[in-house]
Image (tube, rainbow, N blue to C red):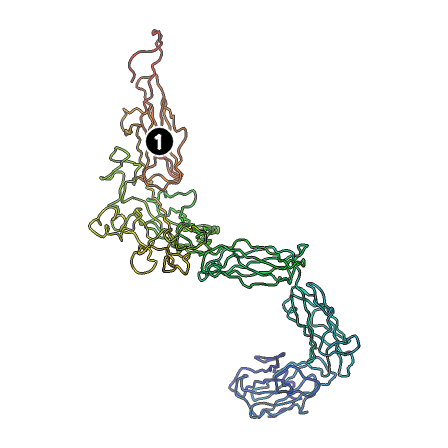
Amino acid sequence: MITGFASLTGRLLLAFAFVFTVTACGGGGGGGGSFVPPTDEGEVFFLDVTLLDENGNPTDTIATSAPTTVRVKVTRNGPNGRVIADVVVTLQTDLGTITPASGSALTDANGIANFSVQVDPSTGGAGTLLAGADSETGSFVGEFNFQVGVSGRRLGFIDEGGTFIENEISIEPDMLLASQAIAQLSFVVLDENGQFDSEPQSISIDSGCLASGQSTLEPESPILVGDGRIVASYIAGGCVGNDQITASLIGSTAQAFGTVSIASAAANSLTFVSAEPTTIVLRGTGGGPDRLESSTVTFMVVDRNNSPLSGVQVGFDLTTNVGGLSISPASAISDSMGMVSASVVSGDVPTVVRVIASSPSGDGSGQEVSTVSDVLTVTTGLPDQNSISLGVEAGSGFIVENGFNINGIERILTVNMADTFNNPVPNGTAAVFTTEYGSIDPSCQTGISNGERVATNTPAPGQCSVLWTSGAPRFPTLTGAEFIRTIFSDDYDCPSLNVSSGPCPDDLGFTRGGRLTILVTAVGNESFVDRNGNGIMDEDERFLFENLSEAWRDDNEDDIYNPATAECQGPESDSRQCIAGQEEIFTDFNDNGRFDLNNNPPIFNGLQCPPEGDGVWCERRLINVRASAVLTLSDSSEWYFSLFNENGGFVNPDTGDVRLTGNDYTLYVSDLFNNPPPAGTTISFSAVEPCEIVSPTSGIEIGVLSATGAFEIPGIEVGGTTDIRDEEGRLEITLTQPDSNPVSVFYDCIPEFIPPPDPNDPDGLVTGPGP
């Protein structure tokens, strides 16, 4: 069924209300169409509306000089669907005249219906084309917005002699423009009769400097003009050199052009502003926001009044290019705030470097002003062996109170890591942990909190922490308690004391009860002595380094990985040392399934090995840096005391015939495994009259300890006198752990006997033997 345009209009409007998708295009000469979801009830049309200029190219402008072709293409379901022939298409517009006059046309074999639109030369502005078509399913529309291109109008300026210079802009001053100065742009719009155009028009003004914001225009573009005359101010900001300006009459092809030449600003001084970050890592070793391979260095250009200068060209150079260190760009122009920046990109060699910035002085001397940045450090960004350490949280100590008896006792372990220059490693550097007793968090990352149970605050740079918790196991897996030494073992040996049991200041030897090793590893470099301070291992420094095997957990604290030694694999494998170390594990860094000493030959491993030395006197291969800490599980169920006189004699608290006065005594305190009390434990001394404590005058508080052996208190003195024969006092020694009940031991004390005066004796003393 063919429907005329007039009767279709109402249905077109209704179709807009229910349209599923509408595609409309303005600039660029695109088309527009609409369709509803496909159904099984009939055809579904998509209408694509396109304007074509006199050359057959898509456009969004209808010129007033000649009719413009309107092409409507009808396809099934969408723009890429099958074309539909013999469909009646209607077209209407709110601006101009349509041909054919009926406003309707039939699509050809390509699904195209052609129209032409003529706009009156006096018309301006923009309009809409609305195309429609019917099928049994319903009515479908396509819409296209266009602008009117008024023909015959020209853009240019009128010179002093009254001559119109077409397509050019008048620029004053017509000479080199100083930085921050203003130029006046003047031009006119003439109609087809050569008269000033009195119709309202819009002029757009564009240039590279205006687009970048380094120059500005007043008034801003586009500029509305009503009498055909336009004057605008061009303010030169940070741009330097020639800036091509284009003025365009909107809705027309008329244009005018001009060029502003801008001089460089005269710099008086350069100031270093910042370098972000101040430490970068070697090329090819970066990763994440904290391991960057480039740093942005910023300077400020100021004039004689210390005001920022824009548009000044600043050159950049480096104090060294070792290892391929580079800077880009080689020069840059300061922005509106006087700022200018360049990027320093790392090379293959660790070093320190500064950026040199230079610019013309601005005083006409031809000299340059320059300044340098703060020091930038180019580093591996990785820890080296002599810069990694592991410790416990301040105030807690390496001895874990009740750790042998109670589950859930905690210690926070903190690792510190620094690079070759002993600068903290970047945030996010990973550390891995293992231990033989209790449990420990598997890893942490420097500068990142490892959870609220470890620390609520962000760790310091180069630091991170994990939590160790007491619990099973507490004995070796393979032997249990069988080989653990105690202060009552049958093979007890205490070289410092002539006793067969009890607390001993010496190490009782393998296997030590309650002592556990925590190993932390990280990927890094071996350490070497950099005698010339250039940050790399030179060939004449090839022997000045610490060679490292693969990392291992030293359970028996003998500095040997026992499972790999010949002794522990041969006839001597049943020695106490081998048994104590049989559960040690190593970190297989190269994943070859065996423990490597890395000593065949022993060469330096690390990224400080220069490319020319790689495989010759060093290797650019990383290793595991490592550190250990030993915690002691204190068996706090019972404490043992041994008191010795100054001659090394043991004082037995169970006998009553010992004389405590008149001697210096030494006390030793330990648990069953000869481990000292934990930090914060206090040992105090008191005496019952007539005895008195001479030294120490106050309690002894135990600090942070990590060594093996009983805790020793020398210089104990007990005094006192009595005039009663055989009178005794008592010495009490009390050990008090934090949050635990005190434990005491008692010794008889025999004071010095001083007889009372005898009134019948001229000397006034009672004679006779003393006690």
Q: Is residue 73 above or below residue 658?
A: below
Depth check: 167 or 211 in front? 167
Q: Residue furthest left?
A: 571
Q: Is residue 754 visible?
A: yes
Seen as rendered, the residue at the extreme right is 161
**Residue at 37% in and 44% down:** 398
Secondary structure at numbered mark 1: strand
Q: Is residue 439 above or below residue 15?
A: above
Q: Depth check: give the residue in front, 743 or 498.
A: 498
Q: Residues within 10 Å of mark 1 (few under 14, many from 20)?
A: some
In the rendering, at what x and y percent does residue 144 appear? 63, 82
User: Which residue is nearer to you in this view: 591 or 373?
Assistant: 373
Quadrant for the C terminus in the image: top left
The image quarter in which residue 406 lies: top left
What amino acid is found at the position of numbered circle 1 in the picture? Answer: Pro
Quarter of the image where one finds residue 549: bottom left
Instruction: Mark yes or no: residue 652 visible.
Output: no
- Position of residue 64 in the picture relative to residue 469 (left or right): right
**The residue positioned farthest toward the front in the image shown:** 365
Return the x and y of residue 268 as percentages of the image width and height.
Answer: 65, 56
Task: Please determine whether, in this image, residue 593 is positioned above or below residue 155.
Answer: above
Residue at (76%, 81%) from the top-left corner? Answer: 191
Foreground residue, 263 or 641? Answer: 263
Residue on which disc 1 sits: 714
For residue 394, side relative to residue 634 (left or right): right
| Percent position of residue 435, x then y | 34, 51
